[in-house]
Image (cartoon, coloured by chain):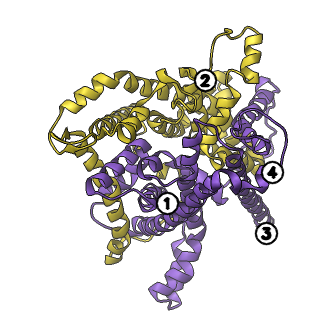
Chain colours: A purple, B yellow
Amino acid sequence: MSGEVQAAAVLGGFTESETQEDNAPGGIPRRRRIGLGDWLLPVYTVLAFVFLLIPIVYTFVFSFNDSIKSNISWRGFTFDKWLNVCNVEGGAVCQAFTNSIIIGLVATVIATVLGTMIAIALVRYRFRARSAISLLLFLPMATPEVVLGAGLAAQFLAVGVPKDMTTIILAHTMFCISFVVVTVKARVSSLDPALEEAGRDLYGSPSQVFWRVTFPLLTPGILAAALLSFALSFDDFIITNFNSGSVSTFPKYIYISASRGIPAEANVIASAVFLFALVLVVAAQVSRAARAKRLAKLG
Amino acid sequence: MAFAAFATAEVQPQAPKKRSRIALFLLLPGILYLVLFFLTPLISLVLTSLQAPSEFGDIGQFDYAFNWQNYVTVVETYLPHILRSFGYALTATVFALLFSYPLAYFIGVKARRWPLLQSLMLVLVIAPFFISFLLRTLAWKQLLSDESFVITSLKALSLMAPDAHFTGTPFAVIFGLTYNFIPFMTLPLYTTLERLDTRYLEAGSDLYAGPFTVFRKITVPLSMPGIVAGTLLTFIPAAGDYVNASRDFLGGPDTQMMGNVIEANFLVLLNYPAAAALSIILMAAILVLVSIYVKRSGTEDLL
């Protein structure tokens, strides 16, 4: 739902919202009262971020723990786990991680294509049963994951489909589609129709106009939607657990090994993924801010 | 629709919509997919929930029937779990709202003058999404275990009874649920607060309203769409969650929620009808609660 859409926008660094101008009326300096609120809120914000980041720091720190089997108490610093990630338990962590990547990629591609098509249709065309279709797109986001997972599993059971990688991909695609639709739809709605009109005026055929004008303009939205899909799929545990049979994914591996202790190698993989995503997003944000500054200078 | 209210992009006036066969071509594959893998599974969940055990079958073998009794049985057996799910989810939602509102207010209103800082803070809000939520929950389990620094210090300061535990208690489960769903609360709150016109707040204080009155009468009503969206985004997944309450994570034998018993019945006990009936109850209860809530908070245009 919207929170995830926001997340997608931040992920992609494509938030279109304009920061509001300072609302102080021109010329008149605003009354300033230095009160409790002036430092209370910033201090709270810092503390809140510290709280939010504690488990991340913990996971990162314990990826350097010289642990033997379970990674509970601190035994000393080592780079070993980072250098030999796949050497534990015959590479079970890495196998699970690879599965997660494959599932995430395939589900993302299918969901992004199907979702983008729906988003374009919703904004651009009139058709029957619009409200029923909107409801069908909204419901998967308002349904608890455990219900989605159990429902699909019940269906696979009834039809007699064995659970494997394919059933996981089918499940992930299902819950990603709605999020793609929401994310891309916002982008389609914000397109300036005049640009496509200009394309048509210049004798572009409908397919030329779509591929040379519309599609490039939609790319940031589609990219954000794909990133969101991948993130949702990669971190999904509940739906996967119901539809995976004996196939392991990274979250499932963690859930199962939680009772006997997680090897530090899992922390290594999670920390690496975290750092990669963080660098990607911060870079996108910084380049967006730089672009905005340049545009402001020109304007 | 819920999304329209939060679309950050400015909506361009669109050319009059056309009817075309292209629409059918664009919609059909995706809609068909959702019918096949979302709608029919829900129907097969309903059918499964009414199944009766096969007469001469093994464990896990059931026949289609019209066995309403399943619902009565699961409610009788799992009433504590059902109540716990909604109680925990509700408490966690309230805590997440109290935690997130000042944070979202600072990012969305106070930090407006520094757009880069604003977007970096947003990255920090969603940063927990980049690391597996199971690992985050396990990190809290370690940090708050009986041998941990936090708990031993609390005990040394006599703020906690010497034989008390944190993990395995309802507090731990609610704590985990709150922590895990905070970003879902903060982001929609931020979205509405970011657009809050601060001139209304100034007008309020010019009319001699104290800061608290301004907050209660102006800020809160104007941010209502964000509050409603955030509470729904937190409550729905929290009510169905079973990781936090699981024994290997923050829960214990007395903190099991609906998700835990659905999982146990489906994947361990192979009692599919019971799992299905519980799922249907969970979904129906959520739909009813959500529609009442949305109606009462006067934001019907959200859905």
> Are circles 1 and 4 on residues that touch, CB within 8 Å?
no
Label 1 to label 4, Cα distance in Å?
39 Å
Q: Earlier in the sequence, mark 3 or mark 4?
A: 4
Q: Are marks 3 and 4 on the same chain?
A: yes
Report the quarter where the C terminus of chain A lies: bottom right
Nearer the observer: mark 4 or 2; the answer is 4
Residue B91, compared with residue B107, is above or below; it is: above
In primary-sequence order, the first of circles 1 and 4 is 4
The answer for which chain carries disc 3 is: A
Q: Residue B167: which disc? A: 2
Which residue is the site of mark 4? Answer: A80
- The chain containing the residue under callout 2 comes to B
> Which x, y percent locates residue A216?
58, 76
- Whether marks 1 and 2 lie on the same chain: no
* Front disc: 1 or 2: 2
Tell me where residue A6 appears, x and y as whole percent: 58, 51
Residue most toward the right?
Answer: A77
Q: Are marks 2 and 3 in contact (CB under 8 Å)?
A: no
